[in-house]
Image (cartoon, rainbow, N blue to C red):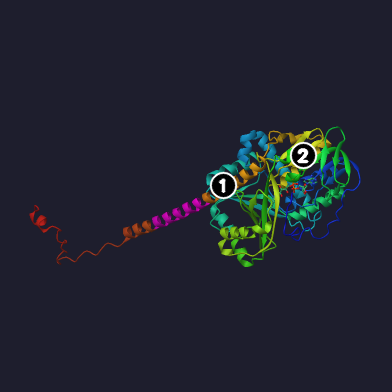
Amino acid sequence: MSETFTSATNGADAAGMPARSRLSFDLDVDICVVGAGLAGLTVALEAARLGASVAVLEGRHVGWSASGHQLGTVMPGYGLPIGELIARIGLDDARELWSLSKEGAEYVRANATEEQIPGIALSEGALEVSNVEAGDALISRLQMLGGDFDTEVEGWQVDRVRAALKTGHYFHGVYYPRAFQLDGRRYLHGLAAMARRAGARIFEDTPVVSIDPSGIRKRIVTPSARLRASHIVLAGNVHLGAPLRRLSETLLPVWRYAAVTEPLGGRLAEAVTFRGSVSDSDGIDHFRIVEGDRLMWASPETTWAARPERFAPAIQRRIQTIFPQLGKVGISEVWGGAVGETVHGMPQIGQLRKGLWVASGFGRQGLNTTAMAGLLVARSILWGDERWRLFSPFELVWAGGATGRAAGYAIGLWGRGSAAAAGALARYRERARLKEQLREARLAEANRQAGTRPPRPRPPPGRPRPQPPPAANAADAEGSPP
Ligand SMILES: Cc1cc2nc3c(=O)[nH]c(=O)nc-3n(C[C@H](O)[C@H](O)[C@H](O)COP(=O)(O)OP(=O)(O)OC[C@H]3O[C@@H](n4cnc5c(N)ncnc54)[C@H](O)[C@@H]3O)c2cc1C
């Protein structure tokens, strides 16, 4: 599967990377991990820390795909909205799954220290904003998150959201003070370095072309060597391909594109005073300020691989739509990566058959969930931790192949279109309400002035009183009784 990025560096993965090593000799290990993205590297780090011998086989290079091109926002939860999670598996299991997702986020936080990953630039707080007036829904969501799901959240009224983000596009907001952001690429390479230090061996340019998962010692074939392992962990996301094509086909690949603007100076500080990550409740835009006065912004999506540069104008227009005061911003870099979406919206974590594991399908929210998956799989293999079974209700469902991709794209477009329409309607209603309030205020003021106007001076006694105006019909007036 081909994938193109304008730049693989973005400043972060340029320097200090160890030379790539390809596997060119046969090897025996406890655990073989296929894929050196966030998921595979976390499994490798944890398994190596717990004393296993681990080999990671990566077909391209560390950070080649989504994991090396994400925006670094770490939130609790999953791609599947919390209400749907409860509807699907009930409140108790939903709470346990939610708490695992928080564990994943805290695991990232524990790794992402300046001592362990220099330059990681961790900063606190993320804001999820609504494109429509959603006051009531917001209150019940806050109650649920804060109460049943033990997650620190604050509800922001429209005024507060608009003081932080000077745009009429957003209404209410949910602020997550424990969410955070970091330099996503540095985190990925830091994770690889930590896994190596813990004893895991990472081989790049080493695609796995087939596996034989039968037997106690499983066989893994690459173009230049063979491995034997007691456990295989498939963490290849949508790129897995040949080793288990049926598994790849349970994921809908969605390419997401992001950009960093040129420095925007003081006008950005005026438009955006919030320093954390911002995402909208429809999953369309995701942005934050980086390097003081640049915007990092992800928005467009396709269900096929395209050249990221093509999306620079779309991101530019999107920024201008949300923050017209910024004008047409210059774009300095664009990139993209493929995320794997499952049909049910939850990640695939667990044991497919004895010794064959999967950790995939993390969608747009992969930092906390890959961390959680890495912990669960490594601890299950080495400690017998069975909590991955909480994911069992979310089976492997075929994502529909080429038809699924076309349908996924159409649904995505429709979803974005209807979210945009709902947003436009909400803003129209807001303007109409403001006009109405203004009209009522003017009316009230006019009434007040009429009520408090000083009485007309009475005519002095003796002077003739003003005569009423002549009746419209003089004959009527003359003929009326006295
Ligand atoms: C633009 C963008 C912004 C994002 N922002 C965020 C964010 O702010 N916060 C967040 O939580 N998530 C974000 N995400 C989502 C997140 O990046 C993904 O969910 C996550 O990186 C998925 O990790 P992964 O390890 O499953 O897959 P991948 O990163 O795709 O890694 C899989 C690896 O496996 C290798 N592989 C596959 N098959 C084989 C094989 N047969 N042999 C050898 N190697 C193989 C591939 O080469 C690849 O390197 C973003 C994604 C994108 C694209």
Q: Which residue is mark 2?
A: 244
Q: Which secondary structure dominates the residues rendered in magenta?
A: helix
Residue 7 shown left or right of residue 136 in the figure: right
Q: Secondary structure at mark 1?
A: helix
Q: Which residue is mark 1?
A: 414
Q: Residue at x 37, y 56 (%)?
A: 444
State the image quarter where residue 352 is shown. Answer: top right
| Relative image position of residue 83 (x, y in whole percent) | 60, 39
Q: Amino acid at mark 2?
A: Leu
Residue 130 shown left or right of residue 362 in the figure: left
- Span highlighted in magenta in the image: 423-441
State the image quarter where residue 257 is shown. Answer: bottom right
Q: Residue at x 70, y 47 (%)?
A: 339
Residue 214 shown left or right of residue 372 in the figure: right
Of label 1 and label 2, which has the lower sequence position?
2
Q: Amino acid at mark 1?
A: Trp
Q: Nearer the viewer, residue 103 or 170?
A: 170
| Relative image position of residue 322 (x, y in whole percent) | 57, 58
Looking at the rendered structure, the number of numbered marks drawn on it comes to 2
